[in-house]
Amino acid sequence: MPLNSPKSLAILTIFILLSISQTTTLISVTELDESLTYIWPLPTEFTSGNETLSVDPGLLLSLSFKAGNSYIIEQAFERYKSIIFKHINYGLSVFSYLRGRTRRSDYDITKLSIVVDSDSEELQLGVDESYALFVAKNEGQSIIAEATIEAKTVYGALRGLETFSQLCAFDYGTKTVQIYKAPWYIQDKPRFTYRGLMLDTARHYLPIDVIKQIIESMSYAKFNVLHWHIIDEQSFPLEVPTYPNLWDGAYTKWERYTVEDAREIVSYAKMRGINVMAEVDVPGHAESWGRGYPDLWPSTSCREPLDVSKNFTFDLLSGLLTDLRKIFPFELFHLGGDEVNTDCWNSTPSVKHWLQDHKMTPKDAYQYFVLRAQEIAISNNWTPVNWEETFNAFATNLNPRTIVHNWLGSGVCPKAVAKGFRCIFSNQGVWYLDHLDVPWDKVYTAEPLEGIISVSQQALVLGGEVCMWAETADPSNVLQTIWPRAAAAAERLWSRKEAISTGNFTLTALPRLHNFRCLLNRRGIQAAPVTNKYARTPPIGPGSCYEQ
């Protein structure tokens, strides 16, 4: 067939068009907008340059800590080294260095210095998480020791390590780790003290290793509270030594958490600067309790709310919280109190008689139960957290230490802080991750301080929390449901409002969120595509992680 024939020209034209299409696609996939800063969440203040620095695979840690060594920092440093140098055969690199084939002087960054002011490793609400990170080439004249993290506490140092790891990128051409746009000078601190993720293990059991993977992923986005909704009406998987039949309410004998399991979760989280707030939701959402102790049910046909008329109910609750206090050192404890339907209290003769004797309505009894539960929590040196229904029903009688947890909609935190209560923002319309039709940008633009003008009242909003309710989530899809949308809330809770609230988010935030989703994937976290219509759904076709 002649090259100048109509058929050959048509084939050639198609080939050229396909080549152009493929080239265009490749360019759009591989080129990132260099004007953006690919650190998530965005630091408070930072400057960068135009140098590229190489990082030694044998990177050394120099730690200055008043108490001497810090196991938390030392372990974190090793974790992050394994992430940063994943593509480099570390053993071979050290061997080559010892043989002189690769000298330490060949690298710009050979040491990471971490300076911590405090000698305490206590982790509680409001612990200082600020840090300063400086990365520059040391040419013998600089006072900066190549890469330096300065922090008030070990937990600030952990946040600095995460940022440092995000600056490090593997160059596939040179097969080395590089830091671009150096020198970096970063001053960073969180906007809110409470930045949480709620995890529901009652509606579907999550094995310990899955919970650990979720905690690990939380640290990448600088979350600092795991709200562990351990039990609910469907199942009671936790061991309680004082009342050993409670975990008869587990789905099966294989879907349980021992005391040691729970302590391991708390310890694992602390190593990553994450508090664990346990929740015991009372008096509703508690049907599973009665499988081990049927006397907690008002009757066999009225299995929740728990029986308000029996002292045994409160004796058991007291024993349960006393046991849990030995496991959970965090100062906050969630007592639930939501979605309490008291109708069957009125239809159960024994409870109805008790209500009449005490001159209470079912609504009064609901208040009575919540306040008694609060007293038990406070007696165990906990600060009670309750879902917003308790505030909506009897705000004037709530213990003044109560933290109101918003979920039903907007407008609750402004009302709560106006009455002097502290508040946690979790508006279900934007921050419930089980709502799969909520897009990333709606999560990103949600504002915890919406409607609150007074600076003193704004200070009463501790922060916010995304909630992973598990009716349709289990180990097969929970990570894809959490990520990457949870990261959108994480930046809202960490970064300065002014820095992330202007401009076209599709241009300023979306490419950075794509990048963070790819970072999660590289680190073994199964984060779903960002822009699909429904969360956690698979890609709709071939393409780059940086565009889906």
Image (tube, grey):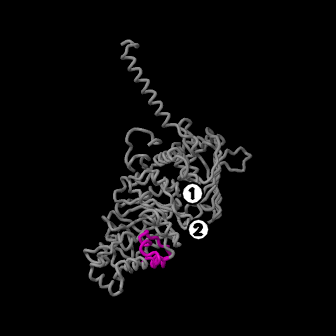
At label 2, the amino acid type is: Ser
Q: What element carries label 2?
A: helix
Tell me which segment is drawn in magenta: 373-399
Q: Which of these two is toward me, 265 or 443?
A: 443
Considering every residue shown, the one lying at the far right of the view is 141
Q: In the image, residue 207 lies at what x, y percent?
A: 38, 59
At label 1, the amino acid type is: Leu
Q: In the image, residue 378 lies at what x, y percent?
A: 48, 77
Label drawn at residue 456: 2
- Residue 146 vs 231, above or below: the answer is above
- Residue 91 vs 409, above or below: the answer is above
Asked whether, in this view, residue 448 is left or right of residue 475, the answer is right
- Residue 194 vs 321, above or below: the answer is above
Q: Is mark 1 on a helix, strand or loop?
A: helix
Q: In which quarter of the image is the N terminus?
A: top left
Instruction: Give yes or no for residue 460 being in the magenta stretch.
Output: no
Label drawn at residue 158: 1
